[in-house]
Amino acid sequence: MESYSNSGTRTSLNMDGEANKAVRGYGENRRKGMCGLALRLLALALTLAAAVVLGVDKQTKTVPVQVSPSLPALNVPVTAKWRYLSAFVYFVVANAIACGYSALSLLLLLANKAGKSRTLASAVAILDIIMVALLFSSCGAATAVGVLGREGNSHVQWGKVCNVFDKFCDRVAVAIGLSLFGSLAFVLMGGLAVMA
């Protein structure tokens, strides 16, 4: 398309280039939005799975207890549950909070048509980073207790318990792994928000 300037010279307008940039920008935003949606669904599924795996984790074993050297050992049933340790309670609650937040933010972002509200997008990005901190701290607490259970601590005379409650400890490890992957999904969502 040609036009004439005030000085009478002929100039060429490139409308196709501007339209291509707008279409390309829309495609990139749509791709980031779909990637963010997939990551949010992944975080929801992983944190839900981590909370459920540890939340239903329970194992009962019969353990011989020696009361006195002159008496025979007593066989006592002992149960390991997640709510017996505050680090595991924190882990389950933190994953449940992250799962609930992920579902709520998913609904809010879907209701926010085409990212019209920058305030909502900023609030969600900040809360995503808070969820990263919450999940990493709960994973750290659960891992610390898990290592104590697997290795024991000879300095304070804490014996190993994972050699007795092996299935319980294996499920704890699986739940921590799921939660760490959920945390990474939130980290990636924060990265997408920074790039937007």
Image (cartoon, rainbow, N blue to C red):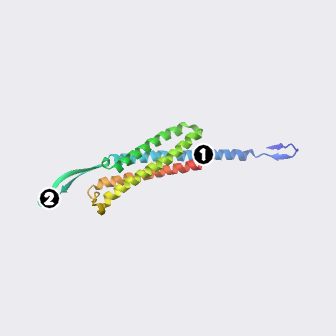
Residue 117 versus residue 189 in the image, above or below:
above
Indicate the secondary structure of the residue bearing disc 1: helix
Say which residue appears at 61% left-offset and 47% top-offset: 28
**Which image quarter holds the N terminus?**
top right
Q: x%, y% of residue 102?
A: 47, 43
Give the residue furthest to the right.
8
* Residue at x 40%, y 50% (from the top left corner): 138
Q: Which residue is mark 2?
A: 68
- Residue sticking out furthest to the left: 70
- 119 over 143 or under it: above or below: above
Q: Amino acid at mark 2?
A: Ser
Q: Residue at horizontal 32%, vertical 59%?
A: 150
Left or right, residue 20 beside residue 114: right
Label disc, if present, on residue 29 of the rendered structure: 1
Q: Who comes first in sequence, dot 1 or dot 2? A: 1
Assess disc 1: are there few (<14), some (14-19) or many (≥20) residues with their C-alpha within 10 Å of its C-alpha. some
Q: Nearer the viewer, mark 1 or mark 2?
A: 2
Q: Nearer the viewer, residue 30 or 175?
A: 175
Q: Is residue 37 visible?
A: no
Q: Is residue 64 left or right of residue 182?
A: left
Instruction: Rate crowding at label 2 as few (under 14), some (14 to 19) or many (20 or more) other CA atoms within 10 Å.
Output: few
Q: Residue placed at 59% from the left, 50% from the top?
A: 195
Specify the amino acid type for callout 1: Asn
